[in-house]
Each structure stands twice: as structure tokens, then as C-alpha cells.
Image (cartoon, grey):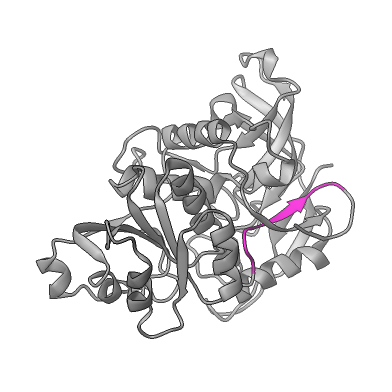
């Protein structure tokens, strides 16, 4: 029988509990008429997977396999699906319920993300899955299995934040990307550089800033410095001495800092709040006509557009670490440890093949 990774239920309060991982047998899925049978070969972790284990994410399930990101090969098709899919390498869409609206999910149930919740009975941390044929894209041929697996959730989130929500995805514009090193921030950096934008970053470590500069960032500052916004302002070009848009996943004091950096009418796109679940909104931001826009993952159309852009620009998602084997729980736990510590630079991947852990 196929294997899968799920959480094991133990007693504990949200935020205090840490659900163990376990390997379980699952039934071999039977494809519906429009389904593809996909043999999963690589998956990647996201912050939500850690939050699920800490019971800090809604509707955790102890039966549904974990993880939302997946790469695999089509091994079978349903009666109405195109037989030409067989043998194709594909990347799975990480969510359901959002077709093409630029505003929000159309489904009355809201957006449903794969992996580890009772809202949708599908996760990618299993050897075989069935998905509808319109819920995959061909994997970009220039990417390795680990790189494809690293792309879906963070790539879609970063794409929507920059390309759909910021209103500033144009060559020559200045963008600030906070918390470089995380998957979304790195995807935004890659998209911005490919567009010809001037990208600046923040991080708690100089090593991550230097790595970002090698990827095309114009410069960066440490957010551990109290007045980091002053240091960043000095880096901006004389002919455009302001930031057009900030793509932020941290929250915290970003509004007070932003008012000193953004142009009047500048845009802050918020896709996460890892520092705190609330932020202050200042009168100074109001007087500057700053625009704060919340952004979540994205639509099926945005996913398709994002994969096409990655293909066109030959972008390679940054992979921080790969461990091998779905049943290799010891090394998989080290990936969760890296998310806890924030030590990764890029995505953390499980390759279902055998081998030894590797840093890229």
C-alpha cells in the first residue's frame, strides 16, 4: 500500500502542543473520470505545516496527509482525461476554490489549501494522489524535482503579492522585500529582478543579505538595527530616492518604518505577520495616502501565469536543504527545526528517493 505522513494526535493546548509525525498506509486512490493518477516524487514544507503541528492553524486533521507542495509523474488517467498526460512531469496546484477572480476566492467555502486539515482530504506527503487534470501544470523542464516542489505555494503567494496586488510590478520601480530567506520573499526577489525592478531586502543576518545581493538585490539592511529604515534610505538611487512598494510577511513595526521610506501613495502588500498578529496604522500613513493591501496565496489563473513566467525567465526556486525518503522521519524533523529557527535560505524539500541529506 502507498505510504503517507500524517500527524499523530496527542494532548496539549494550541501553541504548546507539538504533534508528532507518523508514517501510515493509505489506500491506493481510484481516479474519477477527469482525474490524473500522480506518483509524487518530491514535496516541500511551508510555515503552515509547522503551525499545524503546533495547533496554531485552523481545522488540523490527523488523517489527511500533510503538505501542499508537490511534484510528480502522471502514471494513469481517468476515463475522460487525456491519455497524453501519462508520463508527463507535473506540479500540483496547492489550493482549491479560487478560479480567476483578481479579488478573492469565488467558492462560498473559501480557499482550501492542501495538506493536514479537515477542509480538504488531500495532501502531498504521500506516494500516490489523484487530482483533476485541470489542477496541474507541466513542470518547467529546466528545474530539478526539488526545485519544482519548492515552487507552488510560495511562488503563488509571491506572484500575487507583487504582480497582482502591488500595482508597481514595472521595470525601474523600487521594491522592498522584508525577511529575505523565506520562500515567498525569495520568489518575490526573483520575480522583481526578472522584471527589471530595483529590489532591496531586510534580514536579521548579513549572510542572507549578501546571498540576496548575489541574486540581484541592489542592497539590504538588518532589521535588528533600530533605525534600519535610515540605513536603507541611503542605499536608494538619487533619481528615485523612495520605495514604491513594500512586500512584507513580518508585520510588527513595518507601518512606522514604511512612512519614512514609501513615496506618497505607496503600497504595502502584507502576506503574513510572523512578528505579531496585529499592527498599528499611523496618522502619518493616512496623510501620505499609503495603501495597505492584504494578500493570500492566489487563484488558479495566477498559478498558471506564475509557472509560465518561471518557464519564460528560467527562474530557479532557491532550495535550502533536501532530505531523502518519505519514511525518513529523523531527517524530516530537521527541516521543521530549520523553520522553527528561521535558519533556512530557501525551501526545505523531501525527495522521495533514497539518499543522504544535502545542502544546496
Q: Relative to 171, is 51 on the left or the right?
A: right
Between 44 and 195, the residue placed more toward the observer is 195
Give x and y (percent) for residue 33. 61, 19
Is residue 345 a member of the stretch shown in magenta? yes
At x 47%, y 52%, the residue is: 188
Is residue 42 a member of the stretch shown in magenta? no
At x 34%, y 64%, the residue is: 236
Between 80 and 141, the residue placed more toward the observer is 141
- Residue furthest toward the front? 238
Regarding residue 109, the answer to whether it shows in the image is no
**Bounds of the magenta segment:** 344-353
Q: Relative to 141, is 161 on the left or the right?
A: left
Q: Relative to 27, is 186 on the left or the right?
A: left
Establish if 298 lies above or below 199.
Answer: above
Between 34 and 51, the residue placed more toward the observer is 51
Give x and y (percent) for residue 230. 33, 77
Establish if 179 lies above or below 64.
Answer: below
At x 46%, y 64%, the residue is: 219
- Residue furthest toward the left? 287
Between 135 and 80, the residue placed more toward the observer is 135
Give x and y (percent) for residue 338. 67, 70
- For the C terminus, give its image quadrant: bottom right
Q: How many marks?
A: 0
Establish if 23 lies above or below 179.
Answer: above
Regarding residue 92, the answer to whether it shows in the image is yes
Q: Relative to 34, is 254 on the left or the right?
A: left
Examine the image and state in which quarter residue 253 appears: bottom left
Amino acid at each position: 500500500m502507498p505510504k503517507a505522513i500524517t500527524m499523530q494526535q496527542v494532548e496539549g493546548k494550541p501553541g504548546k502542543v507539538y504533534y508528532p509525525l507518523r508514517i501510515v498506509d493509505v489506500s491506493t486512490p481510484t481516479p474519477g473520470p477527469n482525474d490524473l493518477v500522480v506518483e509524487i516524487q518530491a514535496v516541500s514544507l511551508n510555515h503552515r505545516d509547522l503551525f499545524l503541528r503546533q495547533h496554531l492553524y485552523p481545522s488540523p486533521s490527523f488523517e489527511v496527509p500533510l503538505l501542499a507542495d508537490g511534484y510528480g509523474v502522471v502514471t494513469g488517467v481517468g476515463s475522460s482525461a487525456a491519455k497524453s498526460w501519462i508520463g508527463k512531469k507535473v506540479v500540483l496546484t496547492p489550493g482549491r476554490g479560487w478560479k480567476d477572480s483578481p479579488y478573492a476566492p469565488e467558492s462560498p467555502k473559501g480557499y482550501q489549501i492542501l495538506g493536514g486539515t479537515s477542509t480538504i482530504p488531500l495532501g502531498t506527503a504521500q506516494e500516490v494522489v489523484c487530482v483533476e487534470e485541470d489542477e496541474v501544470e507541466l513542470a518547467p523542464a529546466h528545474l530539478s524535482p526539488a526545485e519544482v516542489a519548492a515552487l507552488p505555494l510560495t511562488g503563488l503567494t509571491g506572484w500575487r503579492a507583487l504582480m497582482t496586488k502591488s500595482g508597481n510590478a514595472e521595470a525601474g520601480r523600487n521594491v522592498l522585500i522584508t525577511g529575505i530567506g523565506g520562500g515567498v520573499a525569495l520568489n518575490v526577489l526573483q520575480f522583481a529582478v526578472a522584471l527589471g525592478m530595483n529590489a532591496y531586502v531586510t534580514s536579521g543576518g548579513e549572510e542572507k543579505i549578501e546571498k540576496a545581493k548575489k541574486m540581484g538585490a541592489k542592497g539590504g539592511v538588518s532589521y535588528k538595527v533600530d533605525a534600519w529604515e535610515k540605513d536603507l534610505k541611503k542605499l536608494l538611487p538619487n533619481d528615485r530616492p523612495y520605495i514604491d512598494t513594500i512586500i512584507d510577511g513580518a508585520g510588527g513595526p513595518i507601518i512606522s518604518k514604511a512612512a519614512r521610506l514609501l513615496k506618497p501613495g505607496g503600497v504595502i502588500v502584507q502576506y503574513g505577520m510572523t512578528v505579531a498578529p496585529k499592527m498599528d496604522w499611523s496618522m502619518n500613513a493616512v496623510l501620505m495616502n499609503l495603501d495597505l493591501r492584504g494578500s493570500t496565496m492566489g487563484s488558479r489563473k495566477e498559478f498558471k501565469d506564475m509557472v509560465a513566467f518561471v518557464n519564460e525567465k528560467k527562474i530557479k526556486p532557491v532550495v535550502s536543504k533536501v532530505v531523502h525518503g518519505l519514511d525518513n522521519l529523523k531527517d524530516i524533523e530537521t527541516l521543521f527545526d530549520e523553520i522553527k529557527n528561521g535558519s533556512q535560505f530557501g525551501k526545505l524539500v523531501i525527495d522521495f528517493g533514497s539518499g543522504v541529506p544535502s545542502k544546496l
